Image (tube, helix red, strand yellow):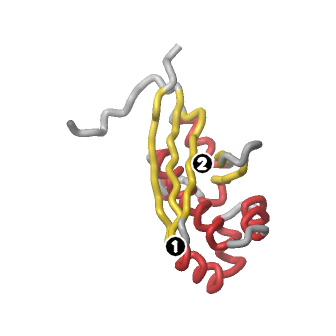
Amino acid sequence: MPEERVTGIGVDIVDIPRMDRALKRWGERFIARVFTAAEVDYSRRSRRPAQDFSARFAAKEAVIKALGQGFRGGCRMCEIEVVAGKMGRPLVRLHGETRRLAVSRGVENIFLSLSHSEKAAVAQAVAVGRAGKVEEEHAI
């Protein structure tokens, strides 16, 4: 049985004032394209919704990078969901084509870390799995 290994990492940072402007300008159309109903509910109950939307947006970008695919490969923002675990730890749930892509790449779990300041939200995603072959795309 192959041992568990890191299959990809991703990081992203989002400017919170820019997200706030996007939310005001594009409203529900933008929200529906990017966020799940649970993410919308969670973020809107927050004292600073733009901060929570920003953290989730950064998480989605970081997950896409960790999967090594990008949007051209079938990943959709609304198929990546950030939920709070029992102790508040952010967890990732994948749906649809994005989930199928992750499974095909041997990804079994994605660890996620979120942080923010007054002006920026950052997320880091680490994909792990038991895929047999490691891609040799790095240069030494």
Label of residue 98 in the image: 2
Q: How many marks?
A: 2
Task: Name, please, the residue furthest toward the top.
Answer: 1
Label 1, on which residue? 119
Task: Give me the residue at 53% from left, 78% from top.
Answer: 18
Q: Is the residue under label 1 in contact with that under label 2 (CB below 8 Å)?
A: no
Earlier-in-chain disc, 2 versus 1: 2
Task: Give me the residue at 46% from left, 33% from top.
Answer: 6
Find residue 103 and report its image quarter.
top right
Task: Give me the residue at 69% from left, 72% from top.
Answer: 49
Spot occupied by residue 69 in the image (x, y as percentages of width and height): 46, 49
Please name the amino acid that badge 2 sits on: Thr
Q: Nearer the viewer, mark 2 or mark 1?
A: 1
Observer-nearest of 35 and 106: 35
SS for tag 2?
helix
SS for tag 1?
loop
Spot occupied by residue 125 in the image (x, y as percentages of width and height): 52, 47
Please name the amino acid that badge 1 sits on: Lys
Classify residue 53 as left or right of residue 120: right
Q: Quadrant of the C terminus?
A: top left
